[in-house]
Amino acid sequence: MKKYHIVFTTINFPIVVDNIYRNLYENGHLEDTKIWIIGDKKTPSKVNELAKKNTNKGLDTKYIDIEEQDRWGKSFPDFYKRIPYNNETRRNIGYLMALEDGCETLILIDDDNFPTNDDFIGKHSIVGSDYAGPLIKENNGFHNICEYLKFEPVRSVYPRGYPFKLRDKRNDYINLESKKKIKIGINAGLWVEDPDIDATTWLNGKIKSKSYTGQEYHVLDQSTWTPINTQNTSVIRELVPAFFCIPMGWDVPGGKIQRYGDIWGGYFLQVIIYGTKYHVSFGRPIVEHRRNPHDYLDDLRAEFWGMVLTDWMVNMLCDNFKPTSSVITERIKELSDFIRKITENNLPKWCPKEVYEYLKWTADNLSIWGCTIEKIL
């Protein structure tokens, strides 16, 4: 039984595994960590050899190819049929496998995010710990974590998924003292080299993150949100059910809706934990994001509906949704009902029927995810 489980999906040969191995070896975490590489139809078969090689060196590494995923999916057919092939949301399968295997802390990365000199596991081990320090509370409800990075050239930069209506504002927050015992439930590590920004920002010119300028960790009040991705994020076991990477790949005008599954999952996570003892921290560990090749115009087409719907979605969540159950899986079902309701009653008139159908599908996906989690736990 391993305490830390690292999950990522890839269609490439993930050289990042060797980097992870070195970091864990140097910091004494080989014995308490397991890696899950979730393959897809385009993933090279030789990844299996890489997994065996690292396991033989002392880092338990599992490569789960499509055949094995298909066999596993027969136990959860309602859920499995909703996870598209050739899609990053297949990482959800790894989440569930890790839970089945006793995972205490789930760590999410992408195949192009490389640990730096930071103790990767050690810094993420903050999740689950008690916290009694100051909490960041923003006047407008959103905190720009990119302000803690030094960029070259100097520009105002916002993370992928940050509301567009707030992108002309800088952080303007107060530090609150927590009046009750809280725990860190989620930790979002940041990045040097290529920041996690949207296609509109990349199309305005290349930019590099040169360094992280913040404290080791900062902690958000539950009334203050920030986009949370799956590039360098850890989640305590109790909250893995709340961090569903939302399936995308739905046909919409101009192509398919893509690249916002983790962002929506991160916002849904933050609304699900509202009123619990769990809070979000961000800062270390820092990874080096060596971004895989991208065509930014293609990215823009894939991100378009995610971008324009995110502002509407978070506005609806902030103003109208407060979960009531004390059980995380029941809160997921409450969220499913809420999304179904706002899709029927509050969807902007400029949304085509394909978006309407996608959001109804998403509401159903959340409900099925919650039921699947209940079977596993």
Image: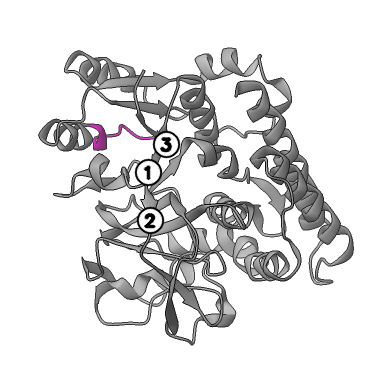
Please tell me which of labels 2 and 1 falls first in the chain: 1
> Bounds of the magenta span?
10-17
Q: Amino acid at mark 3?
A: Leu
Residue indicated by mark 1: 110
Residue at image coords 81%, 56%: 356
Label of residue 106 in the image: 3
Front residue of 232 and 290: 232
Front residue of 5 and 8: 5
Q: Secondary structure at mark 2?
A: strand
Residue indicated by mark 2: 131
Q: Reply above or below: 300 against 45.
A: below
Mark 3 vs mark 2, foreground winner is 2
Relative image position of residue 217 (x, y in whole percent): 30, 61
Relative image position of residue 262 (x, y in whole percent): 53, 50
Front residue of 43 and 63: 63
Q: Amino acid at mark 1?
A: Asp
Q: Secondary structure at mark 1?
A: loop
Determine the image quadrant of residue 159. bottom left
Kindly give the residue lying farthest to the left in the view shown: 26
Q: Residues within 10 Å of mark 2 (few under 14, many from 20)?
A: some
Relative image position of residue 247 (x, y in whole percent): 63, 43
On the picture, is 108 further left or further right than 120? right
Image quadrant in which the N terminus is located:
top left
Residue at image coords 48%, 75%: 137
Tell me whether the residue at label 3 lies in contact with that at label 2, contact meaning CB atoms closer than 8 angstroms: no
